[in-house]
Amino acid sequence: MSAPVKQVATGDRAILPEGAKTIPIFVMGKRYEVPETLTIMKAMEYAGFKFLRGAGCRGGICGACPTVYRREGDYKLYFGLACQTVVEPNMYLAQIPFYPANRAVYDIEKIEPVADAIHALYPELFRCVACNNCTKACPMHVEVLDYISAIKQGDIARAARISFDCIQCGMCASRCMGELPQYHIAQLVRRIYGKYIQPKAEHLQKRVTQIESGRYDKALDELQKMDHARLEKIYKEREREPDMVPLGAWMPKDTQYL
Amino acid sequence: MKVSYYPGCTLKTKAKNLEDAAVSSMAALGVDFQELQRWNCCGAVHSLADDDLIHHVAPVRDLVRAMDQGSRQVVTLCSMCYNTLARANLLMRNDEVKRKTINDFMSEETDYHGEVEVVHFLNFLRDTVGWDTLRSRVKASLNGMKVASYYGCTLVRPADVAIEPAGGGKVMNEFIDALGGSPVDFAASTVCCGSYQILAHPEAALEVIGRIIESASSAGAEALILSCPLCEYNLAKKQAELVSSGKISKKLPVYYFTQLLAIALGLGPEASRLDLNEAGSVEFLKAKNFPVESGARA
Ligand code: SF4
Ligand code: SF4
Ligand code: FES
């Protein structure tokens, strides 16, 4: 007889094997016994919570599941994404799926790509006291104060770069002494940067023009009509760029579509 | 020589002429002016409320950043940045209780006890570059130009952060002298420019601005220099209004002191950035035969 398969924490619902260790966590003040090794999100579902808000991608990128918690015997606040943070014994937690933060109205087509325009839309920028609470609250470890400072200094490119990993979860705004909506300001900055400042990818524009001119229509048409067996065959036989080949060092033999 | 330098937000946006002129001048003098790698707002105004410690966090964080990157000295250009940084530094040196509270609050940073020296650029020129060196590097002497030094408040008040002892009023005069100009003493040199009152109580501010300009002009000044973007806003940008309301008889060209430095060192218009000054500033210098015509008026 083969050994019984141990199964812990798989799928959306964890099935607890016999003898699996559980730990106590406190969700909004109520104690639950949950299997260790689960993420907060899975632990909460294990405990019976159902997410209507507060869960999206389950992959740490949508910003729907920010969670604030404390550890036993520690006065500090901690922040994490419920879908990425593993439960700890006796953690006290609550999810904050949404946090109100003012968002300025603007037309990105008409905006002037300069610091003054950003400052005028978000004058509360100048209420920042550099307390750094925002940075401490960021589950993505974005240097929030640094991007806010860069925006005040008019350095749009730097602010866009520093804020790149922001997933708009809102935790920074929840802790801000100056009541800034940091992530909305950073989003405006990245929009301006992307549209007006970042160098354009000319090769991409060229390819888009080629596609729009109908250059590939015929080939795509043929592919769509192709029977399954032939499709499979040409797929398997296709030329493929080898992994790790230095940039520009490889060319396919068939260049008719380039 | 490498020198750590704290610019301040306004120098990166509205007062590029204050910064660009200083940075180019330093390069010309062989000083490697290195902007702090990370910095935030200086706090702008030093909070006087005894229990309001949060407003000291911004300047202290800047000083921690300077210390962390190994700087023992940080040079500033803007009078207000200088004032808030220097006062926060004193607080961290002298007030044990507040120092502990602030360090505890900023638990993510290295503890700070006032290790870094905050130096205003004028004092840096005097003490590190030296007036004699500066004098020897002048290529386009101000040639007796009558220049009034406007200190305003924050360079000289309060006494424990003043860039020179009370009643001094010398360092800017020595600076003008080193550049070949004739310093003009005038009564309103340390009278407040009206500061932020220009927004809340514009009438009161305009009154005092008018008095300062008249005081300098009637003492014979042909131009006025200063080191603060807020003073510049009031004393330069508001002059047209004062002329049309008859509060002053004629306009007086206003420059950041760093701009006259760049000009005297013979650096081009790209360095002195007069394109950002009020109308009349370029014309005045041009009439004196300084090569200040800018092909690239931004
Ligand atoms: S910067 Fe703010 S909104 Fe963006 S990920 Fe960090 S805490 Fe969330
Ligand atoms: S939390 Fe707000 S006030 Fe504090 S540093 Fe961040 S943006 Fe500034
Ligand atoms: S569910 Fe999307 S980040 Fe957690």
Image (tube, rainbow, N blue to C red):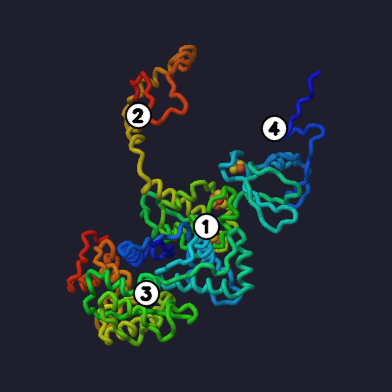
Residue underneath mark 4: A10
Q: How far apart are marks 1 and 3 (CA)?
A: 35 Å
Residue underneath mark 3: B126
Q: Quadrant of the C terminus of chain B?
A: bottom left
Same chain under badges 1 and 3? The reply is no
Same chain under badges 4 and 2? The reply is yes
On the rendered structure, is B99 left or right of A208? right
Residue underneath mark 2: A211
Same chain under badges 3 and 4? The reply is no
In the rendered structure, which disc, 4 or 2, sits on the residue that comes first in sequence? 4
Q: Where is residue A60 in the image (x, y as percent from the top left)?
A: 59, 41
Residue underneath mark 1: A145
Residue A216, compared with residue A231, is above or below; it is below
Is disc 3 surrounded by few (<14), some (14 to 19) or many (20+) residues within 10 Å?
A: some
Q: Is mark 3 on a helix, strand or loop?
A: helix
**Image mark 3: chain:** B
Q: What element carries label 4?
A: loop
Disc 4 and disc 2 in contact, CB within 8 angstroms: no
In the rendered structure, which disc, 1 or 2, sits on the residue that comes first in sequence? 1
Is disc 1 surrounded by few (<14), some (14 to 19) or many (20+) residues within 10 Å?
A: many
The mark found on residue A193 in the picture is none
On the rendered structure, is B1 left or right of A181? left
Disc 1 and disc 2 in contact, CB within 8 angstroms: no
Q: Which residue is drawn at 58% across and 60% down?
A: B109
**Image mark 1: chain:** A
